[in-house]
Image: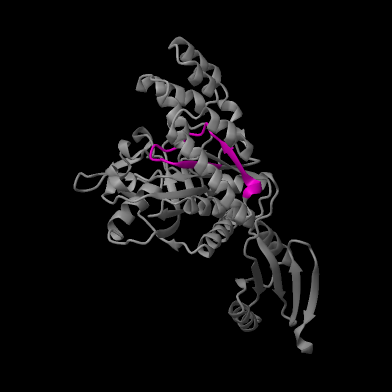
Amino acid sequence: MEQKLHTPEGVRDIYNRECEKKISLQKKLSTVLHQYGYQDIQTPTFEYYDVFREEIGSTSTRELYKFFDRDGNILSLRPDITPSIARAAATLFENEDFPLHLCYAGNTFINHSSYQGRLKENTQLGAELIGDDSIEADAEMLAMVVDGLKKIGLKEFQVNIGHVDFIHSLLESTDLEEAEKEEIRTLIVNRNYFGVEEILDNRKAEKAVKEAFRILPELMGGPEILEPAAAVAPSAEARLAITRLQHIYDLLKLYGAEDHITFDLSMTGSYGYYSGIVFRAYTYGTGDAVVRGGRYDHLLEKFGKNTPSIGFAIILDELLSAMDRQKIETPAEHRNLIVYTEETERQAVSMARNFRNKGKNILLMKRESEDGREKFEAYGKRSSVVSMLYLRDDLKIEMVNLVTGEEKVIDTAKK
């Protein structure tokens, strides 16, 4: 049998500098969520298949990684962490009346039917506010996204906000069959508004309905688009959605987040469980959203707890890729190298202990007397080491900054 030494399609190894940057990014973003008072929760990497079944509205069941346990139960790797947290919240906090502020980080797995360069395993970091249906909760979630992206050094990014009720009301006003509504929804997602117009013309939809869909591409931008959106809103439900978006924007100004906010009334959300506002964050250097989120007031009902909720997920792999292309430096923890010989071992271990007690990351490497400094310099540079202390048998230490090339010699015998 041939031994497989490479990874399967859609997954990859992450190591050295890239791995350090990814972990650093995760720590910074987690710090922002903790500053907002959110507590960590960890859910299993795999669950019973029912947690992600079709009616949950997470991911197509065709794209789930499914397998069996010893008892014949169908299990699935999680494609999305929100249903797992909804399941946990409904059981672990069944009798809790106060809102739950939860945050998480973990990997998700989607078996895309066509690969096309997309990863099948992604790391997500996010937050869920469970038990609060207020406008304030919506604004807090969006403010957290903006603060988090600012914290890691992004300057050029936009958070697009829509509302499921607005687009749902437009679709309901067409009086079309469900299959045709779904076709229109797909066309809107793909920005094919000519296709939408053709369907409505063929079905002889009312003039006001066709006009609302006609200007849908124009309902993208700043808060100024909310007024014309309200003018074409076909129902009280749609008008309430617009009013809510306006109130959310007013609160976001208090958070100082409004500069990164735009509206897109054509948004439907990437998951079927969304029921209120939906949002995505975009930046340069990636063709996909780096953050996805929305309100899901009925998801927990599927697990036995009737409570409103809202959350978001930051896709770390997309975000890291975008930051690299924008040349935004992601500081990683400095690694330092001490190279010693048999004769200088006692001194090296003592130095390493002192540095570690001060919070420094120290890698100790013993060398043979014939090994030259260049060998360890080359190793340090390809292993993301920042500085090297090269201990010589004559009690002198060569200090080398492997990033800048600066160096100096310290004679410890004189001290």
Left or right: residue 75 compared with residue 224: left
Q: Is residue 262 magenta?
A: yes
Percent across and percent down for residue 391 are 70, 76
Whether residue 163 appears in this view of the structure is: no
Q: How many numbered discs sit on the rendered protein?
A: 0
- Residue at 70% from the left image edge and 73% from the top image edge: 389
Give the residue drawn at x 69%, y 64%.
386
Say which quarter of the image contains residue 321. top right
Left or right of residue 239: residue 413: right
The boundaries of the magenta stretch are 258-280
Task: Identify whether 367 is placed above or below 278.
Answer: below
Report whether residue 406 is seen. Answer: yes
Q: Quadrant of the N terminus?
A: top left
Image: 138 above or below 271: below
Residue 24 quadrant: bottom right
User: Which of the pair 52/202 is nearer the observer?
Assistant: 202
Colour option used:
one colour
Q: The C terminus appears in which quarter of the rendering?
A: bottom right
Q: Quadrant of residue 373?
A: bottom right
Q: Position of residue 19 (x, y in %)?
A: 57, 55
Magenta stretch encompasses residue 415: no
Classify 359 as above or below 76. Answer: below
Query: Where is residue 60 drawn, in percent x and y?
Result: 37, 34
**Identity of the residue drawn at 66% across and 50% down:** 154
Residue at the extreme left: 71
Q: Nearer the viewer, residue 49 or 299?
A: 299
Nearer-the-camera pick, 127 or 325: 127
